[in-house]
Amino acid sequence: MFDEKINESMGGAGAVRSVNERVKPRLQVSGSGQVRRPNQQILAGKLYDLSVTGASVFLDLQLPLKEICTLRLQIFRHGSSYTVEVQGQITNTMLVGSRGFRHGFQFLSIDSLTQKTLNAICA
C-alpha cells in the first residue's frame, strides 16, 4: 500500500502531508446522511465519520469533486441523537467495495449553534 502525498498551501509556504492526516481528528460514528445537490437531487447515505470541520458519507453514486451540497446529518453518539444541517464541499471520493462511494465533505460557513453541536458531539 502506498501513502499518497498532497501539497497544502499555508500562507505562501507549502507543506506536504498525507491524505490520511486530518486538520481535526475524525470520530467513527453511527448515523445517516442526506445530501442535497445543487440540482436539488436528494441522496440518502450512511455517515461514516465526523469531525468539527467535516464528515464522510457513503453514497451509491459518485459525485464530482468540489461540488457544494447541503448535508443533513443524523448522528448517534453516547446514547443521544443529534441532527445538523450544514453546507459541505466534496474534497475526495473513493469506491469502497460493495459499500458504495465514500465522499469526504469539508464543512463551509458553519453557524454558531451547529458549531456548538459539533463540538459537543466530538468532545
Image (cartoon, rainbow, N blue to C red):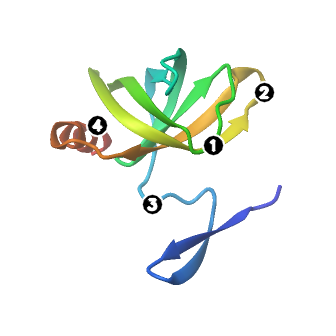
- First of labels 2, 1 by sequence position: 1
- At a point 38% along the width and 25% down the height, the residue shown is 73
User: Local crowd at mark 2 within 10 Å, few (<14), some, or many (≥20)?
Assistant: few
Q: Nearer the viewer, residue 37 or 52?
A: 37
Which residue in the protein does label 1 denote?
Answer: 65
How far is the residue under mark 4 from the one under mark 3? Answer: 17 Å
Is 116 situated left or right of 40 in this image? left
Name the residue carrying label 3.
23
Disc 3 vs disc 2: Cβ atoms closer than 8 Å?
Answer: no
Task: Relative to 60, say whether 67 is above or below.
Answer: below
Q: Find numbered disc 2 in the image and state the secondary structure of the residue it sits on.
A: helix
**Dots 2, 1 in contact, CB < 8 A:** no
What type is the residue that disc 3 sits on? Val
Q: Nearer the viewer, mark 1 or mark 3?
A: 1
Give the residue number, with chain letter if any, for mark 2.
97
Q: Gap in Å between the C-alphas at discs 3 and 2? A: 27 Å
Dot label at residue 121: 4
Task: Report the amino acid beneath label 2.
Answer: Gly
